[in-house]
Amino acid sequence: GRQELKDAEFLLHGAPLAADEQEETLPLVDTARIFEDTARDHGFSCSIEYTDRLVSKALAGPRGLRIRKNVRFSAQETRALAHHEIGVHYLTTLNARRQPLCVLQIGLPVNTITQEGLGVLSEYLSGNLTLQRLREIALRVIAVHEVVEGTEFRHTFQRLVEQYEIDPERAFDVTVRAYRGRGFTKDYVYLRGFRTMLLRFQSGQTLDALLIGKTHHDYQPVLERMIAKRLLHPPAFQTVAFAKPAAPDPILAYLVRSLR
């Protein structure tokens, strides 16, 4: 919808935060250690595979976490990625395997908005979400909109570089991500999903039922009733950031509250 575009434009016109200044990147061995420690904090182990067959920087799969081989992360980026991919995506994969309904492994209808919303919420509540990361998501919203509008690749790339003053290499990565497979549109729902999940969390609602598999928040009341009747199991693993949230940066908290 138009609101996603408005939120994206809002985030892209803000001034950078001092805390978002570029950190040094970590050696692969240190990155892997953070991923392994995050999995251990959640009560399970997770295999880490480095591959040159990914367009995205990382992807949680059925066997663990796959990382693009030529990408390097700062410590905060690594922690954010770990809380998103391991603390939500891989965690819900493991929880789904324990359920009697296989559909929770495949995914309920339109589950992406909830799953990615929970992922970004985990980044935020763990204290690792940055304005730079929010802007990255906002750029993807702009790029996906251009894909849907039928804009050529080169024009979208030029818009990101010229209108938003994005580094060409970064703009190219965002554009490639949006245009792969004739249009990769899932990135459009990250901001709305994050806002929806944050409002639920801040209202005091438990998110436990959404962690039992690849769920959608519209089905939360049904899932909670099924858990109460022992037709489904409560989540075996819980997202640590939801149980022990960190205090957010006040400026970032203000920007997040301004999303609609």
Image: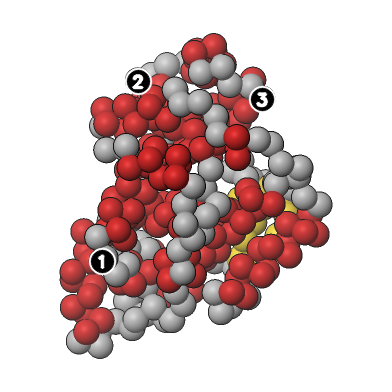
Occupied quadrant, residue 205 = bottom left
Spatial separation of the CA atoms under disc 3 and disc 1: 41 Å
Occupied quadrant, residue 226 = bottom left
Q: Which residue is mark 2?
A: 149
Across and down, in percent, residue 230 comes to 25, 88
Q: Which residue is mark 3?
A: 169
Q: Residues within 10 Å of mark 1 (few under 14, many from 20)?
A: few
Question: The disc labelled 3 sits on which kind of residue?
Answer: Glu
Q: Which numbered dot is residue 205?
A: 1
Spatial separation of the CA atoms under disc 2 and disc 1: 37 Å
In the image, 105 versus 122, the foreground residue is: 122
Question: The disc labelled 1 sits on which kind of residue?
Answer: Gln
Q: Is residue 65 visible?
A: yes
Query: Which-is-in-front pick, marks 2 and 3?
Result: 3
Across and down, in percent, residue 187 comes to 43, 39
SS under mark 1: loop
SS under mark 2: loop
Of mark 2 and mark 1, the one earlier in the sequence is 2
Q: Quadrant of the C terminus?
A: top left
> Is 222 on the left-hand or right-hand side of 207?
left
Across and down, in percent, residue 153 comes to 51, 19
SS under mark 3: helix
Q: Quadrant of the N terminus?
A: top left
Pointers 2 and 1 in contact (CB under 8 A)?
A: no
Pointers 2 and 3 in contact (CB under 8 A)?
A: no
Query: Which-is-in-front pick, marks 3 and 1?
Result: 1
Q: Residues within 10 Å of mark 3 (few under 14, many from 20)?
A: few
Q: Which numbered dot is residue 12?
A: none
Q: Residues within 10 Å of mark 2 (few under 14, many from 20)?
A: few
